[in-house]
Image (cartoon, rainbow, N blue to C red):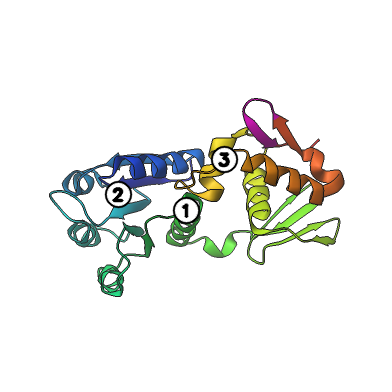
Amino acid sequence: MKGKVLIIEDDKFIRTITRDCFLEERFNVIETSTGKDGFDTFDETIDLVILDIMLPDLDGWSVCKRIRAVSDVPIIILTARSEDEDKLMGFELMADDYVTKPFSPAVLVARAKVLIKRARGNILGEKDYIEKSGIVVNKSSREVKINDESLELPPKEFDILIYLMENEGRVLSRDMILKTIWGYDYFGDMRVVDTHIKKLRKVLKDKSSFIKTVFGVGYKFEVK
């Protein structure tokens, strides 16, 4: 288990999308739809709070202030508003990050992981690369090498490769890939995933066999 996340969000659609994204990354998730329920649910076992601002009965600023009075847990403010005054308010209340809707679930989870690691004091020990049978990916510099030969990958292909490699052996549906890479607000053709997988395989050449097609479902990364 990577940690326990408390989502306090009154929009059911956004709450569900956010919850599913964290569940896919094997987080334990608790969700509430009001500020009061969110604060009442909070306890010392929570590793991170995703907090909406516009909540019924008790707004996000009040919840943030109350949590900060009892805990230094990482808090990500989630809101549809992007005014500088709102951001300043969030940081004055010692929120750790600020995400404006619409947002990419993949980016939200990535930010959450960094905050949790920092809170646990092991951020410096985290490897910034993934290596699988000759494929080396530097997540920070966004560089890919196969047997020391550098490859040029467009952004989407790079993100898909990271997602597949980090979930080695796990079948990822086209819908999961769409939500993670393109974001929950993408409403285009699902076949875009197949198109980018085809391009990724072409660049990987002899390593392309590591990306397996699971017919009728999606794809998985599996080293022979």
Secondary structure, mark 3, is loop
Instruction: Pick whichever of labels 2 and 1 is earlier in the sequence.
Output: 2
Residue in the picture at 40% in, 45% down? 18
Local crowd size for mark 1, using a 10 Å CA cut-off: few (<14), some (14–19), many (≥20):
many
Residue under label 1: 104
Q: Which residues are magenta?
A: 214-220
Q: Nearer the viewer, residue 29 or 184?
A: 184
Distance from disc 3 to disc 2, alpha carbons, whole Å, reads 43 Å
Residue 62 in view: yes
Residue under label 3: 189
Q: x, y (%) of residue 174?
A: 59, 36
Residue in the picture at 67% in, 63% down? 142
Q: Nearer the viewer, residue 111 or 69?
A: 111
Residue 216 drawn in magenta: yes
For this orientation, the residue located farthest to the top is 216
- Please determine whether, in this image, residue 94 is positioned above or below residue 17: below
